[in-house]
Image (cartoon, rainbow, N blue to C red):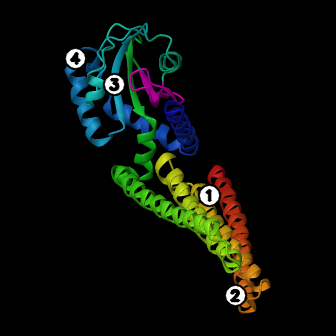
Amino acid sequence: MTIEKNVLVKFMNYISVIERYHEYKAPIHELMASIVAGAFDEAFFDDENLLKTSMKWLGQNYPFVELMFTLDKDGVQVSNNITNKKQYSNHKSKGKGVDRSYRPYFLIANESNDIVVTDPYLSTSSHKLCISTAVKYTNKLNEVVGFLVIDIDLEHAIEFLMGDRKRKKFHPFFICIYSFIVIGLFFVVGILLYSAGSEIFQLLIAPTPENIHLKPFGIIIFLTLALAIFDLGKTTMEEEVLMKKDIFRHSSTRRTITRFIATILIAVSIEALLLMFKSVLGAPEYLGNAVAMMAASVGLLIGLGIYVYLGAKAETLLKQSHFNK
């Protein structure tokens, strides 16, 4: 079950990355083309140390760059996989001598004289979504000497373009804090359930007319609060810990607020009903409070509906504006 959840989270993460890629496709391709144009040196095909020096510079200035290597005219890799990241440096396959003629970057670059950029695909080295850019090098006799290929981590490249790198570094810390908060909420839920259970037990062993009329309301209050707090903790756990939340997407924030307000709305509505029942059973002084709470729940419902409608409409307009550029 845990493996299935991890696969689902990774799949949802891939969907989010792909969606962001389509939004930022033009600047990503322009950035990749400029990186290759700035880094290219014809000496790369003769001296692998120059590749390493260039990769070190790229890693310092563009941390999302994963791999750099060269191919011969037939698509066979003539250099090792050059990277400044340990997880790739220790990879069993160094790449040299591997036939890359079937890879999309070679097929596209072989038919073009310009710098080419592929669509996203899963890297065989990092097993993450990446895109590759390649350029064909020809000598003065117009003979193909080889190809320079650079791979980038697509998710990190998008974070780089959106200025989200610093927040990502603190993300594990945020997850820990949210986890502690959720544990505290669940602990409170346990106390409320214990209180409700105690009330039920006392009602069963000592059923008096007064207890039968009043005890159920206290039990319902405990259970209602437990339900509301549990739902709040569950929502926080799902939105902030288990699922990857895109804070730049309006729908993510709108979903979180909607679920939170819906939890409060349910709790307020149930409490209003309880006060209504109490007023009917001989406590008319609760009627005003019941009506006020019911009006508050209606106001929350109307406000939530307006927020969801306007938020969805605003997001649609933003997408249309983005695609029209």
* Residue depicted at 38% across the width and 56% down the height: 174
* Residue depicted at 65% across the width and 53% down the height: 319
Whole-Å distance between the Cαs marked 4 and 1?
Answer: 54 Å
* The stretch drawn in magenta includes residue 133: yes
Q: Is residue 87 above or below residue 35?
A: above
Q: Is residue 175 above or below residue 80?
A: below
* Residue depicted at 68% across the width and 54% down the height: 320
Q: Which residue is mark 1?
A: 255
* x and y percentages locating residue 82 in the rendered image: 28, 23
Q: Are marks 2 and 3 in contact (CB under 8 Å)?
A: no
Q: Earlier in the sequence, mark 4 or mark 1?
A: 4
Task: Name the amino acid type tagged 1.
Answer: Arg
Whole-Å distance between the Cαs marked 4 and 2?
Answer: 82 Å
Task: Name the amino acid type tagged 2.
Answer: Asn
Front-lying residue, 116 or 280: 280
Whole-Å distance between the Cαs marked 3 and 4?
Answer: 13 Å
Q: Secondary structure at mark 1?
A: helix
Question: Which label sits in the foreground, 2 or 3?
Answer: 2
Question: Which label sits in the foreground, 4 or 1?
Answer: 1
Question: Which label sits in the foreground, 4 or 2?
Answer: 2
Q: Which mark is residue 47?
A: 4
Q: Secondary structure at mark 3?
A: strand
Q: Which residues fall within the magenta stretch?
A: 114-135
Q: Which mark is residue 68?
A: 3
Task: Name the amino acid type tagged 4.
Answer: Asp
Question: Which label sits in the foreground, 3 or 4?
Answer: 3
Q: Earlier in the sequence, mark 1 or mark 2?
A: 1
